[in-house]
Image: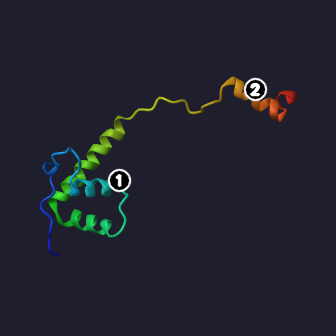
């Protein structure tokens, strides 16, 4: 297979701060949102190009680190406000049943 792509590296970031085509493809691949034919291209490049594989690995590492850093302090059960319970009870007759 002929490789028509320059090596994929972080240094290819465009001057405007956006993602290069290689970065966008690698990130979409990591996120699992690619469809054919881009999915096949990404898989092939991941297997054949060390630079693209490293780019994919860097995005995986970033997303894993961000995922580990997210800490949610939420209760297991979220209950409605007392007045909401009162309205539900009034409409269903639950307040009459005790």
Q: Which mark is residue 31?
A: 1
**Badge 1, how many Cα within 10 Å: few under 14, some, many 20+?**
few
Q: CA distance from mark 2 to mark 1?
A: 44 Å
Decide which of 66, 33 is in the foreground and name it.
33
The residue sitting at 85% across, 32% down in the picture is 93
In the rendered structure, find residue 49 and report the number of the disc placed on it: none
Question: Which residue does the image show at 69% across and 23% down from the upper left?
Answer: 82
Name which residue lies at 22% across and 57% down.
Answer: 21
Instruction: Estimate the x, y position of residue 53 in percent, counting from the top left.
Output: 20, 58
Residue 59 drawn at (x, y percent): 26, 49
Q: Residue at x 36, y 40 (%)?
A: 67
Side of 87 where 74 appears, left or right: left
Which quadrant would the C terminus be assigned to in this image?
A: top right
Q: Secondary structure at mark 2?
A: helix
Which of the two residues, 76 or 11, is positioned nearer the viewer here? 11
The image shows a total of numbered marks equal to: 2
List x then y, in percent, for residue 89.
79, 30
In this figure, which residue is indicated by the disc labeled 2? 86
Position of residue 76 relative to residue 29, above or below, is: above
């Amino acid at each position: 297979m002929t490789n028509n792509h320059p090596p994929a590296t972080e240094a290819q970031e465009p001057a405007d701060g956006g993602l290069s085509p290689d970065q966008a493809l690698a990130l979409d691949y990591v996120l699992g949102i690619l469809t054919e034919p881009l999915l096949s291209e990404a898989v092939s490049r991941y297997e054949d190009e060390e630079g693209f594989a490293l780019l994919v690995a860097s995005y995986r590492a970033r997303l894993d680190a961000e995922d580990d850093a997210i800490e949610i302090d939420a209760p297991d059960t979220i209950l409605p406000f007392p007045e909401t319970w009162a309205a539900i009870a009034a409409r269903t007759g639950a307040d009459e049943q005790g």
